[in-house]
Amino acid sequence: AQTVTQSQPEMSVQEAETVTLSCTYDTSESDYYLFWYKQPPSRQMILVIRQEAYKQQNATENRFSVNFQKAAKSFSLKISDSQLGDAAMYFCAYRIPGGAGKSTFGDGTTLTVKP
Amino acid sequence: DGGITQSPKYLFRKEGQNVTLSCEQNLNHDAMYWYRQDPGQGLRLIYYSQIVNDFQKGDIAEGYSVSREKKESFPLTVTSAQKNPTAFYLCASSQSGNYGYTFGSGTRLTVV
């Protein structure tokens, strides 16, 4: 069974600084997808960024980027120029293509942004 | 605007009672999912459905039931067999392929 591990239960960053959230996963599949989701205090989950395993290029969405290391099974999220609105719980998720597309989630990292 | 609507936002259940959580989407997504979220834990999959009239158990299906009579709707019933139902429940949907999920705003269920 696939597992997703987020080793940092809590992280903090100063406003305008950069922070990196870690995620590792375990799988025997060669083709899969990885995601980062944000859950703010409202608890509405929002997709932040996704990465296809067959792509070597790291995904980027504005201030959010990933460092995908397939051999190491690592998928970290970098948030640049942190803003107060980035404060949330962040979940890493793994999904295999096709089928029902069910995802496996990590336990989350709570990010605090200090003004 | 397209999205997923979960209702109610808060729900209270008495011991021995069955309750149903509603989930409706107008995104024309084929797949729908129910996840449970407990404090300090990630999301755990309860049930999922790829097409109408078909659904599969997830990792923690015991004490729960679902139906998928319409593409737009995927209600979750928490039965009296679920001994610890107090949690936050999230419904999600997805297109086929490599897309991520779209989530509803969740239902907070509390046993009283």
Image (spheres, coloured by chain):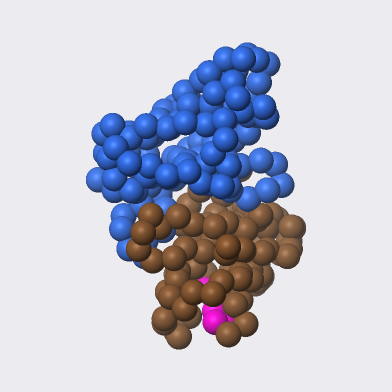
Chain colours: A brown, B blue
- Percent x, y of residue B49: 37, 44
Query: Which region is colored magenta?
Result: A65-70
* On-image quarter of the N terminus of chain A: bottom right
Percent of width and height locating residue B44: 58, 47
Q: Quadrant of residue A105?
A: bottom right
Left or right position of B60 against A17:
left
The structure residue drawn at horizontal position 41% and vertical position 82%, both measured from the top left corner, is A55
Quadrant of the drawing holding the C terminus of chain A:
bottom right
Q: Quadrant of residue A80?
A: bottom right
Q: Nearer the viewer, residue A84 or A91?
A: A91
The answer to which of B46 and B93 lies nearer the viewer is B46
Asked whether residue A34 is drawn in magenta, I would say no
Q: Is residue B95 above or below residue A82?
A: above
Q: Is residue B104 left or right of residue B13?
A: left
Q: Is A114 or A100 nearer to us in this picture?
A: A100
- Residue B35 lies, in percent from the top left, at 52, 43
Above or below for A104 versus B110: below
Where is residue A19? Give x, y as percent: 66, 70
Q: Would residue A32 be visible to someone looking at this image? A: yes
Q: Is residue A68 a member of the stretch shown in magenta?
A: yes
Residue name at image x 33 percent, y 48 percent:
B50
The main secondary structure of the magenta stretch is: strand
The tally of labels here is 0
Work out whether residue B72 can be spotted: no
Q: Which residue does the image show at 57% across and 64% down from the upper left?
A: A2
Residue A18, quarter of picture: bottom right
